[in-house]
Image (cartoon, grey):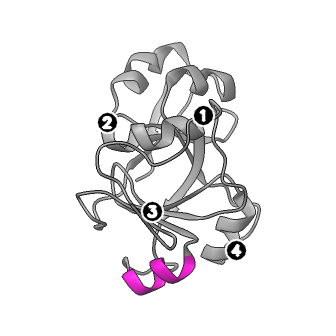
Amino acid sequence: MKIGTHLFLFKTILYKQTTKKHTLDKKVLLVQTDTTVGFLSQNHEALSSLKERKIEKPFVTVTASFKHLKTISRVPNAHKKRVRRAKESTFIYANNRAIRVINDEKHKAFIKPFVWMYSTSANEKGLCYDKEFAFGKSDIIVEDFRGLFEGESSSIYRLYQDKLQRLR
């Protein structure tokens, strides 16, 4: 069921499966992620503008597969098992990319057709989630049976060759 730009998901994602990889060029989606409600987009500039942050400041990249992770970054041998088993954790790799592989089945099913997306929390800088702000700033609102709720952010770790540093 589609009402304006508000999508309701029940059992499957409401996209036509015409191509393997989907794209929503320059669109910002409001989605319940595996951790908290967030903005997702494949357009870095759109998210930077929305969050009023410097264009150089990177966003977390979320992906549904380890296969894609291997194409964008190298996981140090000492941390491969940790990364594979991690839940709700974001890792910063040697190339300074923050990447989270989604384990939550509902969010994974949503991300999979897009392969990857940039992710950020759906709030104003330094504030808590505000429904009016989030709805006003997003182009497409995707909601499933859980609704949209603020949860705990993912843990962030920086991976070095043999060392791990917790940042959040």
Sort mark 1 into few (<14), some (14-19) or many (20+) by Cα contacts within 10 Å: some
Q: What percent of the width, then of the height, locates residue 66?
A: 51, 23
Marking on residue 93: 1
Q: Is residue 104 visible?
A: no
Q: What whole-number distance in Å separates the C-alpha atoms at marks 1 and 4? A: 25 Å
Q: What whole-number distance in Å separates the C-alpha atoms at marks 2 and 1? A: 24 Å
Seen in the image, is 101 located left or right of residue 114?
left
Q: What percent of the width, then of the height, locates residue 167?
A: 45, 50
Task: Please identify the quarter of the rendering in which residue 51 is found.
Answer: bottom right
Marks 1 and 4: CB-CB under 8 Å?
Answer: no
Q: Secondary structure at mark 4?
A: helix
Q: Is residue 81 above or below residue 22?
A: above
Q: Is residue 32 visible?
A: yes
Closer mark to the observer between disc 1 and disc 4: 4
Sort mark 2 into few (<14), some (14-19) or many (20+) by Cα contacts within 10 Å: few
Give the residue at mark 3: 38
Quarter of the picture holding the N terminus: bottom left
Label located before the other in sequence (4 or 2): 4
Q: Secondary structure at mark 1?
A: loop
Marking on residue 49: 4
Q: Which residues are magenta?
A: 130-137
Give the residue at mark 2: 105
Label located before the other in sequence (3 or 1): 3
Seen in the image, is 86 located left or right of residue 90?
left
Marks 3 and 4: CB-CB under 8 Å?
Answer: no
Closer mark to the observer between disc 2 and disc 1: 2
Q: Secondary structure at mark 3?
A: strand
Q: What whole-number distance in Å separates the C-alpha atoms at marks 4 and 2? A: 30 Å
Marks 2 and 1: CB-CB under 8 Å?
Answer: no
Q: What whole-number distance in Å separates the C-alpha atoms at marks 3 and 1? A: 22 Å
Label located before the other in sequence (2 or 1): 1
